Amino acid sequence: MDNRPIGIFDSGLGGLTGLKALRELLPEENIVYFADSGRLPYGDKTAGQLRCMAEQNLRFLTGFGVKSILVACGTLSSNAADILAGWPVPTVGVLTSSADWMSRLTGSGPLAVIATEASIRSGGYRKALREVCPHREVVSVGCPDFVPLIESGHTAPGDPLLSEAVRKYLQPVLDSGAEALLLGCTHYGIIEEAITAFLGPEVTLVSAAESGAAALCSLLLKQKMTGGGGKTRFFTSGDPDAFNRSAALFLGEGAGDIQADAVERWEIPQEDRDKI
Ligand code: DGL
């Protein structure tokens, strides 16, 4: 029994897909969720900036005495995999967990991954998928408009701006005949319905966020480190009210007790901001 909290972070709403998945697997855990909304989007940052932010966010959550951390962000997981792997607190990133998940899929046709520009540019997903599925073609597409659209509320399947972006980014995936599509950015779980509506039900969707939650759950069970009081604390480096509103909207349905009703602000220290 280990009642220390689990830390989860992302640039904004995306990591909530991981939080939701983790809550379903381990409802008793105490969780500290950090949304770095003040520095969103991550997808247009350089690898150097992202590595710096990964360290700063890991340090912030480590300060809560967390027993483990879920980096519910494909962009940081793919640009700072070595930092995550070497962190003194057991840390799971969604890059390795997604590759593991994809390796368990049956079939031999092409695989696709969509993620932020910075994730795709890092080559991390392509490399990880090639390693676990060496005989399958891998198609990767960067989708820079998705995160800004999702964060500004364009998430409904019939939304015209979202539909246009979905068509633009997913046509190559459809053309490739991909059998499975990895949602390599945790935000994309929020628009899963729009993605399925375009690709059709034959294409298996794999959520990086859910794979991360499952990997963290296995780790805690294996190490006998589960336990807690089922509480969630939310922090943001952006506007707490805005995050509260969007998070409550997203978490609303079927999220049990994880209503984001009190979001606290974390003012990123000036010396940390100067490094970005
Ligand atoms: N949700 C994040 C990811 O998984 C970051 C998106 C962004 O801020 O660009 O990559």
Image (spheres, rainbow, N blue to C red):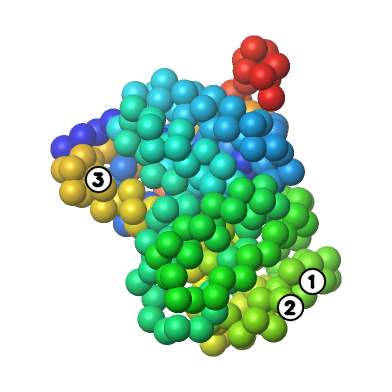
Residue 90 pos. (x, y %):
32, 36
Decide if residue 199 is on the left or right side of residue 131: right
Secondary element at tag 2: helix
Asked if 124 appears above or below 276 in the picture, the reply is below
Q: Are marks 2 and 3 in contact (CB under 8 Å)?
A: no
Q: Which residue bears the numbered disc 3?
A: 220
* Picture quarter with the C terminus: top right
Amino acid tagged 1? Lys
In the image, is the residue at mark 3 within 8 Å of ligand 1 by its beta carbon? no
In the image, is the residue at mark 1 within 8 Å of ligand 1 by its beta carbon? no
Amino acid tagged 3? Leu
Residue pictured at 40% horizontal, 55% vertical? 97
Mark closest to the chain's N terminus, 3 or 1: 1
Classify mark 2: residues with Cα within 10 Å, few (<14), some (14-19) or many (20+).
few
Q: Which residue bears the numbered disc 1?
A: 168
Asked if 201 appears above or below 230 in the picture, the reply is below
Residue pictured at 59% horizontal, 23% vertical? 266
Nearer the observer: mark 3 or 1; the answer is 1
Q: Are marks 2 and 1 in contact (CB under 8 Å)?
A: yes
Secondary element at tag 3: helix
Nearer the observer: mark 2 or 3; the answer is 2
Q: Which residue bears the numbered disc 2?
A: 171
Asked if 166 appears above or below 272 in the picture, the reply is below
Amino acid tagged 2? Gln
Residue pictured at 64% horizontal, 31% vertical? 48
Tell me how far mark 2 sits from mark 1, CA to CA: 6 Å
Q: Are marks 3 and 1 in contact (CB under 8 Å)?
A: no
Q: Residue 150 occupies which quadrant of the picture?
A: bottom right
Classify mark 3: residues with Cα within 10 Å, few (<14), some (14-19) or many (20+).
some
Classify mark 1: residues with Cα within 10 Å, few (<14), some (14-19) or many (20+).
few
Residue 86 pos. (x, y %):
38, 32
